[in-house]
Image (cartoon, grey):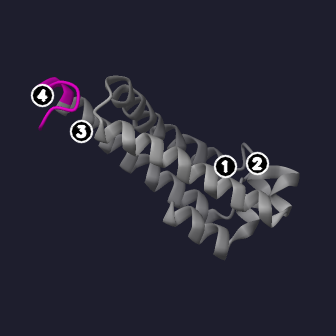
Amino acid sequence: MIAAAAIAATSPEIFTSTLGPLGRQPSATLVFLVLLTLFLVVVSYGVLRRWRWMFWLVVVAFLAGVLRVPATALELAGVIPMQGPAWYLLVQAVIGLVQLAVGAVLIRGYRKGGVWGAF
């Protein structure tokens, strides 16, 4: 959430390109950040309550982060249109690799201790 707010403050053109025509309105960016915060609150609550389905949702989301790496490579190669500046694309690729690592740790923990088990 802090990173999204920092990007909105320093490079608002990223939100403009992502949100399309709505991104040109500052209120749309604010609504997006509020909805993102609410989503993260619900996910956090589910993790704290140890909801089984939330565990699998989190695992799938983290493992899907690896898709950012080939997408970034294709964007930098010019195969698909760039969705932001090069530095932003590289940050997205690094985030994707970190997500993959966290997903692998979650799977490893599941195998050792079950859903939300200690590992």
Which residue occupies the foreground of this view, 19 or 88? Answer: 19
Give neighbour class at mark 2: few <14, some 14-19, many 20+ (Cα, 10 Å): few
Front of the two marks 2 and 4: 4
Look at 43% across and 41% down and name the residue there. 43
Q: CA distance from mark 3 to mark 4?
A: 12 Å
The prevailing secondary structure element of the residues shown in magenta is loop
What residue is shown with label 4? 113
Q: Say if 24 sits above or below 52 in the image.
A: below
Look at 59% across and 57% down and name the residue there. 89
Q: CA distance from mark 3 to mark 2?
A: 33 Å
Whether pointer 1 and pointer 2 mark residues with C-beta atoms closer than 8 Å, the reply is yes
Location of residue 53 in the rendering, given as x and y in whole percent from the top left corner: 38, 23
Q: Earlier in the sequence, mark 3 or mark 1?
A: 1
Q: Earlier in the sequence, mark 1 or mark 4?
A: 1
What residue is shown with label 2? 81
Whether pointer 3 and pointer 1 mark residues with C-beta atoms closer than 8 Å, the reply is no
What residue is shown with label 3? 105
Q: Residue 75, which numbered label?
A: 1
Quarter of the image with the C terminus in it = top left
Identified by mark 2, the residue type is: Pro
